[in-house]
Amino acid sequence: MASCYAELSKISKTKECREKALEIRREIGDRSGEAGALSGLGDYQLSIGKTQRGKELYEESLQIYCEIKERSSQGATIGSLGDCYLNFGDTKTAIDYYNQALEIARETKRRRSESMRLRDLANAANYEKRFQDAIEFATQSRTLGAEMESPYDGSYCNTYLAEAYLFSDKLDEAHSAIDLALQFNIPLNNHKAQSLLGVITLGKDDVLTAKQAFLSAIDKADEILSHNEKSFRALDIKGLALCGLSFCEKSEDFSVAKQAFKSVRTINKDLGGRLQISRLLDTLAQISKTSLLEEVKIIASGLNQT
C-alpha cells in the first residue's frame, strides 16, 4: 500500500504507513521487514529534500540486509545510496554505488533491477556530461524494459535519452526519445517529460507545441505538489516550465518562476539538483537566444542565498 501512495506522492500517508510497518516489524522480530521499512522511510526523506537523513536510513537498512544476507535487497539499497550521492553532486561515488547495485542485480538475475541501475547510470552520465555514455546506458535499459513491458523504463529511459540528445544539440533525436517517453503514464515523471518536450520543440521553433507542453508540465507538477508541497524536483521543473511558457508568450515577466525557484532552495540545496536545473535553464536560454534568464538562473542555483 505504501508503494502505491508513494507513486502518487501522497507523502503524509506514505510516512504513516512506513512508520507503522517499522514499529510492527520490530515488535515481531522481522529483520527483513524492518530493513524494508527503513528503506521506505529513506525514500520519504528523499522525496521531501532531506537527503542526508535519507542516506542515514538507507545505511541502517543496508546493515540489516548484510547481516541477514539478503543479497537482492542489498543491491536495491545500495542503488538508493547512489541516489543520495547523486543528489549531493558526488557523481563519482554515486556511479560506484550504481555499479555495485548493477553487479548484484545481474548476480541475482533481477532483470528489473538491472534495468533500473542502467538507467541510473544513464542519469549520472548526463550529470557528468558524458552524453554518449548516457545514450548507451539508456538504450540498454530501454531494451530490457521493452522485453519486460515495463512502463517505468519506457518513461525514464527515454527521458534520460532525450536529455542526452538535447544537451548534445541533437534536437530531432531528442524529440523522438521524448515522444516515446510520453507514451507511458508515470505520475512522478510526466511533468519532466512534458517540460523537456517544451524545451525541445521551442528549439525547433514549434511554439504552439512548446506552449502546450509547458502548460501540461506545470499542471502535472502541480498535481504532485498538491500531495507533497516539498517535492523540490516538481518545483524545479515547474520553474523551468514557467520560464519556457514566458518565452512562448513573448513575456519578460519571470516573477512566478523566480518564486518557484526561491521555494525550491528553501527545501533543498543539494548540489546535484542545483546543477541539473541550471543546465536545463542554460539550454533553454541558449535556445531562446536571450540573457533574460540570468537572474532566474542565479536564484535556481542558490547562489543568491547565504
Image: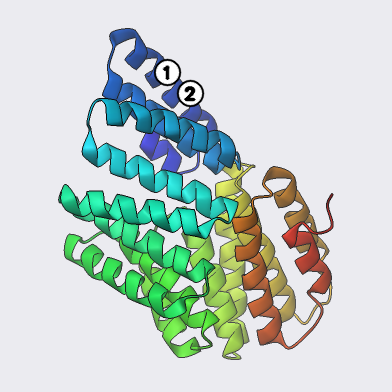
Q: Nearer the viewer, residue 164 or 107?
A: 107
At label 1, which amino acid type do we have?
Answer: Lys
Left or right placement of residue 233 versus residue 144 in this view:
right
Q: Position of residue 287 (x, y in %)?
A: 66, 86
Residue drawn at x 46%, y 38% as measured from the top left: 43
Q: Quadrant of residue 234?
A: bottom right
Residue drawn at x 78%, y 53% as measured from the top left: 262
Q: Among all residues in the image, which is located at the extreme top?
A: 27
Q: Which residue is mark 2?
A: 16
Q: Position of residue 268 (x, y in %)?
A: 67, 46
Q: Residues within 10 Å of mark 2 (few under 14, many from 20)?
A: few
Q: Nearer the viewer, residue 195 or 119?
A: 119
Compared to residue 253, the image places residue 249 above or below, namely below
Distance in Å between CA atoms under marks 1 and 2: 6 Å
Residue drawn at x 83%, y 76% as measured from the top left: 252
Q: Residues within 10 Å of mark 1 (few under 14, many from 20)?
A: few
Q: Secondary structure at mark 2?
A: helix
Compared to residue 177, the image places residue 256 above or below, namely above
Q: Nearer the viewer, residue 249 or 265?
A: 265
For the residues bearing labels 1 and 2, Cβ distance under 8 angstroms: yes
Left or right placement of residue 219 versus residue 254 in this view:
left
Tell me, yes or no, if residue 156 can be seen here: no
Q: Which mark is residue 20?
A: 1
Q: Position of residue 19 (x, y in %)?
A: 45, 21
Tell me, yes or no, if residue 236 can be seen here: yes
At label 2, which amino acid type do we have?
Answer: Glu
Left or right placement of residue 100 versus residue 189 in this view:
left
Q: Position of residue 31 (x, y in %)?
A: 29, 20
Q: Secondary structure at mark 1?
A: helix
Colour scheme: rainbow
